[in-house]
Amino acid sequence: MEPLSRRRAVRVLSVSGLAVATLLAVGSLAQAEPEGGGARVIDACVNKATGDVRIPTSYRPDCGPFEHSIRWNVRGPRGPQGPPGPAGLTGPSQVLSETEDIPANSAFQNVSVECPDGLVPTGGGFQVDSPDLTVIGSVPLVGPGGSGLLGWQATFTNTTDEVHAGTAYILCYTAPS
């Protein structure tokens, strides 16, 4: 048998080392897979007297003499299908807006926008024409006595000597029948 050259020996050792590293990596991946077909196993300790449950930590990894060990990873049977939910909103949406001048040096100026009859509001927002205009609030506009959503209201404060514009937006959809 012919002795290996230094270059060939290095190549054989490199390939062998790579093969061993690959086997170790694949083996550790298989070892890291949770038990139970992908379900995570939960280990816990149950106090025999009180029934209190604790999850072991690195400080107390084992159950004590007054505890018993439990493990679970069982998924229960699927429950029955629930009843169908209410009909969702249909039809095209509309984005409506109302822009008003916010007077100079004024506080708590409300700008409101409402959905037309037959449409329901689903959200809203605001826009300012200047970083000097402060938004104090942006809230749903509720009907009298809490009778439902009507629109959207934005409240602005202008601390400058100039008039600025504040806009309230509303997103409306066709009301379910």
Image (cartoon, rainbow, N blue to C red):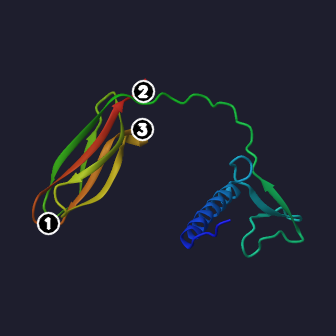
Mark 1 is on which residue type?
Thr
Label 1 – label 2 distance at C-alpha: 45 Å
Badge 3: few (under 14), some or many (20 or more) residues near its Cα, within 10 Å? few
Relative to residue 23, is residue 173 depicted above or below?
above
Spot occupied by residue 164 in the image (x, y as percentages of width and height): 13, 57
Q: Are marks 2 and 3 in contact (CB under 8 Å)?
A: no
| Earlier sequence position, callout 1 versus callout 2 | 1
Say which quadrant the C terminus sits in. Answer: top left
Residue 107 visible in the shown view: no
Identify the residue position indicated by label 3 in the image. Answer: 147
Residue 151 visible in the shown view: yes
Spot occupied by residue 159 in the image (x, y as percentages of width and height): 18, 66
1 sits left or right of 44 in the view? left
Front of the two marks 3 and 1:
1
Relative to residue 172, is residue 32 depicted above or below?
below
Of 78 and 126, nearer the camera is 78
| Earlier sequence position, callout 2 versus callout 3 | 3
Mark 3 is on which residue type?
Ser
Secondary structure of residue under mark 2: loop
Label 2 – label 3 distance at C-alpha: 17 Å
Spot occupied by residue 175 in the image (x, y as percentages of width and height): 38, 28
Label 3 – label 1 distance at C-alpha: 37 Å
Q: Which mark is residue 160?
A: 1
Of 12 and 58, nearer the camera is 12
Q: Are marks 3 and 1 in contact (CB under 8 Å)?
A: no
Mark 2 is on which residue type?
Pro
Q: Which mark is residue 176?
A: 2
Give me the residue at 77% from left, 60% from top. Answer: 43
Badge 2: few (under 14), some or many (20 or more) residues near its Cα, within 10 Å? few
Front of the two marks 1 and 2:
2
Say which quadrant the N terminus sits in. Answer: bottom right
